[in-house]
Image (cartoon, rainbow, N blue to C red):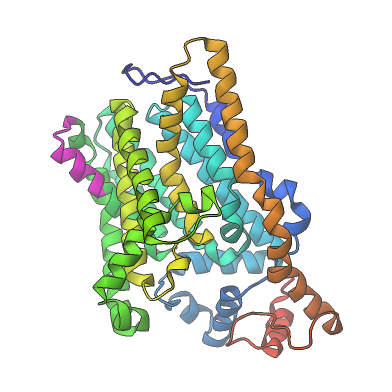
Amino acid sequence: MSDQNPSNGVRPNVSLAWVFVGALVGWVPLIWHFEYFWQFFYFMDEWDLINKMDVLGYQNWVFGFFAENFVPVFKLIWSGLIFSGNGNYHFIMVFGFLLHSLILLLIGYLLRMWGFGLFTILFSQLVVGLNYTHIEVLTWTSQYSSLLAFLSFLLVLVPFSRAYIKQIVTPWSVCTVIVVVSALGALSFSRGVLNGVSIFGCCVVLWMLRDPKVKSVWRAAISAMIPCVGIALYIAIWSFSNSSNFSSSGSRLDAIFTHFFFRISLNPWYQQIRELQISWSQALVLLQLNVMCLVFGIRWARKANRPLLYLLVLFFLGDAFLLALGRNHLHISSISGWRYQYLILVLFAPFVGVLLEKFLGYVRQDLIRRSASFVVLLVIARWVFIPWGVHLPTWSQERGTYARQKIVDDSSVAEDYDISKFDEVSNERALELKEKYNLH
């Protein structure tokens, strides 16, 4: 299974069947813990979205800002799921797992395209597909905006990667598609503006490294960047003019630096190792671990793999910077929150996969190496998956079971139980919205 030879310039021949198998693991949490997932219900921001849609009118709501987010594409898709699913929360959640599986498919496809080994591909898909930290992203449908944006990023990467690998300039017709898909991502999630910017930044890095292949990807990179820059400027102008978060704390350079430091240090290992304390000394240790993974991952990857790894590093740093800029008013403990882990795991998993595959490659006996690779994948899959069963019972109660009981039988839970957990949507208002939109 460990078939990557860093010294060999020939890309390994990994069957697409493995990529599809790896993508299917994204459904395992839903199937395995079906009874808990089916308890989740509309929660906090979702009630706010529905309430604003009802109060403002559909068109004004779709094209209005949501906090510092301008996400009309997400709103159109999310509200469309409510209407087409007749208010059924399960219907929207299944769509989220479909996005999750598509992302896994594209992760595997792109890693295969860039010539990564089978072990690294499966490792990345398993770590991202089964990870317990996705509880918040996959069960809170307002978070699907980030999945839509990242799906857009991966889709744009396909023609970009093909142009680089085959050294062919992307046709203008494909560039038009890139512009549209890139814009859809940026209009689904505010940090989706990183999609095109990071791709263009990767081209700049390749140009600085005097990579002759970069000349074939400038057109695709600029096509991906232009809509992202335009949308980013629009969001920035509105945010600095209207957002209290930016106006009150955006200029606090010390807070921005602190949050940036902890974001690139704590993530992803704080949640993956577990039971760690948040402190400067602990963050320094984890930062060293991150640097080692990134540096040695690039060093030990084949030369043909490295452009994609450069791109992932840029995306990781850009994401940390934007979060530090916009969320520096929050407590440090929020930095390693579960909702932020999805993207970071996608970015980091290939580096760790390359390192593990390098070590496994020292085992010369083929059968032993393949057996060891299988055991490593099995152990890691179990490590990231088991906590679902630990956390889901509590999460499903607090974000679903009690709210459903309150709506069906008011006497079954505390009299003052807050259905929406959102200050602007009272229980009376929640019941009105539930009846009007058949929320169930």
Q: Quadrant of residue 96?
A: bottom right
In the figure, is residue 152 to the left or right of 133?
A: left
Range of residues picked out in magenta: 200-212
x, y (%) of residue 212?
16, 30
x, y (%) of residue 167?
25, 29
Extreme residue toward the top, this view: 365
In the figure, is residue 400 to the left or right of 152?
A: right
Extreme residue toward the front, this view: 281
Above or below residue 87? Residue 348 is above
Q: Is the magenta region chiefly helix, strand or loop?
A: helix
Asked whether residue 207 is drawn in magenta, I would say yes
Residue lying at 42% horizontally and 33% vertically, measured from the top left: 111
Q: Quadrant of residue 18?
A: top right
- Compare residues 240 and 339 and report the one nearer the observer: 339
- Compare residues 398 and 261 and report the one nearer the observer: 261
Asked whether residue 52 is drawn in magenta, I would say no
Q: Which image quadrant: the C terminus? A: bottom right
- Compare residues 28 and 179 and report the one nearer the observer: 28
Residue lying at 40% horizontally and 71% vertically, measured from the top left: 70
Above or below residue 15? Residue 366 is above
Task: Evaluate whether residue 365 shows in this view.
Answer: yes
